Amino acid sequence: MRCSFFLCLAALLCPVLHADDRPNILIIVTDDQSPFTLSCYGDTLCDTPVLDSLAKSGMVLDQMYHMGSMSGAVCSPSRTMIMTGRTLWHLPPRSRKPRKAEVGQTDGRDILNNTLPAVFNRAGYETFRTCKKGNSYALANALFQIVRDQTSRGADATQGSQWHGERALEYLQDRKERKASKPFLMYLGFSHPHDPRVGRDDLLKKYGVENLKKPPTEVKEGAPPLPVTWLPEHPFHHGHPGLRDEVAVSGVLKSRTEATVRNERGRDFACIENIDQQIGRVLKQLKANGEYDNTYILFTSDHGIAVGRHGLMGKQNLYEHTWRVPFLALGPGIKAGSRAPGRGYLLDILPTVCELAGIEQPETVQGKSLAGVFRSDQDAVRDTLYGCYCGGTKPGMRSVRKGDWKLIKYDVLDGEVQKTQLFNLAENPHELLKQHHAADVVRRTGHEPEAHQVNLADDPAHAAKRKEMETLLLSEMRRLKDPYRLFDQPEE
């Protein structure tokens, strides 16, 4: 059924305020993509020419994060934060039968009708969405005027990233045929590179890997090297017993061998390159429509992921490869080749696109607009960043970053694991631990850390900095209404 039918129906439900030359908004969100899969963040192994071009034509933000999760399905709160602009502990019910742990303080406010699609519907935009089904804000997703959702984690045109690309192309082609005058908000979500990371045959061959349901026994020629942060296991338990992402991913299971991780990295890259190709097709159609120059394009992911780094495989940790997200911005007024810290969260997307479109942001929004960063009026929107994971045993993990310093704390397994990590990210950007200095790890990764690249939490020389960061973390937990306290924190 053609898009125009749904737009006619939407027009009856949401009358057009006015037709003008307001900018279009294209938000591209991948599923489970570490920033360290893109050349602009230092990893040139994965071939992404389209995203590389976006980075060169617009702005790269270096310190963007997803804030965290109280659920093993990290994407659920993450995507709800994107839709609402609200912080982790202030999220509304995301479905008619929500998980109690994911519902936070809303003060009785109407969050649903102030979500991303609702706001842009009222402003007279056409709103279009294609993305995976499940583990997101279902009630808000249904408010887009056109919804083409399907979980597409296969390799062919009917089940791969091509499916999402085609739906976006159909919508843009329909706009061209209709000679649409209203601006659009497009949410282009991909179901990859989320596991089982089923890659296309040609791309699997390119990266020297194969789709497997059980861990491989040998390394195939041409497979990507191990990441410099690889470990055969994490130094202590991550605090979520039986977590699917760490014990049951197809082709990985509990294996963290060199053969397994290198094969899985290649599958990850194959899925990401396919996404890159689909984005290229969509941008080509935007140009054919004559709408490219008046479109703001934001590219990000719902969170990062480990894929063998630090001996972990999933997204239930707070290391930079997982807590941090890629973030590119392109559009009118954004200087080509520019770069800034940003120091934002995914929840900042809603207030940002509101400002870019000249729309007043709802009072329910708790995020901050990044538009000033895009204009180079400022380099960041906040000084301190807070991270959380407590989808496993409580109270879980917490992190805080300010400047180059980062603290991570663990309080899991009923007090069995109580750890603190302190890193200077300028001197130890990969958050290397003493285990990364082991001879066998160095031999396999080919990376020999410098002596100071370790966890500094118990180093007397950094006691004052640890105390400062501990105080800062507690302050952020209080400010953001975190309901938990860690083993060495006061209860109030």
Image (cartoon, helix red, strand yellow):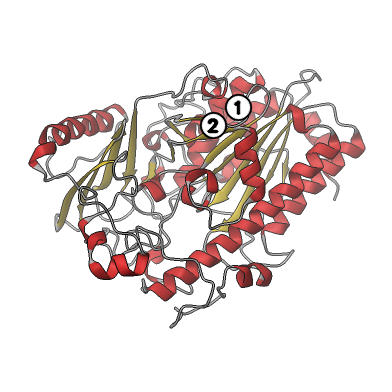
Query: Are the two marked residues, 1 and 2, in contact with CB atoms closer than 8 angstroms?
Result: yes
Q: Nearer the viewer, residue 140 or 218?
A: 218
Would residue 56 appear left or right of 79 to someone viewing this image? right
Secondary element at tag 2? helix
Please provide percent x and percent y for residue 31: 54, 52
Please provide percent x and percent y for residue 275: 64, 54
Q: Nearer the viewer, residue 386 or 232?
A: 232
Three-letter residue code for mark 2:
Ile
Q: Quadrant of the C terminus?
A: top left
Instruction: Tell me the number on the disc at residue 353.
Output: 1
Above or below, 380 against 141 in this view is: above
Task: Identify the residue at horizontal 48%, vertical 44% (top origin).
Answer: 41
> Dot 2, how many residues are within 10 Å of its Cα: few (below 14), some (14-19), or many (20+)?
many
Per the model, the C-alpha gap separating discs 1 and 2 is 6 Å
Task: Identify the residue at horizontal 49%, vertical 64% (top origin).
Answer: 265
Q: Quadrant of residue 462?
A: top left
Task: Identify the residue at horizontal 58%, vertical 68% (top origin).
Answer: 207
| Pointer 2 residue | 349
Tell which residue pokes out farthest to the bottom in this image.
Answer: 217
Q: Quadrant of residue 63?
A: top left
Please provide percent x and percent y for residue 157: 74, 64
Would residue 224 appear left or right of 148 to someone viewing this image? left
- Answer yes or no: is residue 477 visible: yes
Please provide percent x and percent y for residue 185: 69, 33
Q: Quadrant of residue 206?
A: bottom right
- Answer yes or no: is residue 253 visible: no
Above or below, 56 against 309 in this view is: above
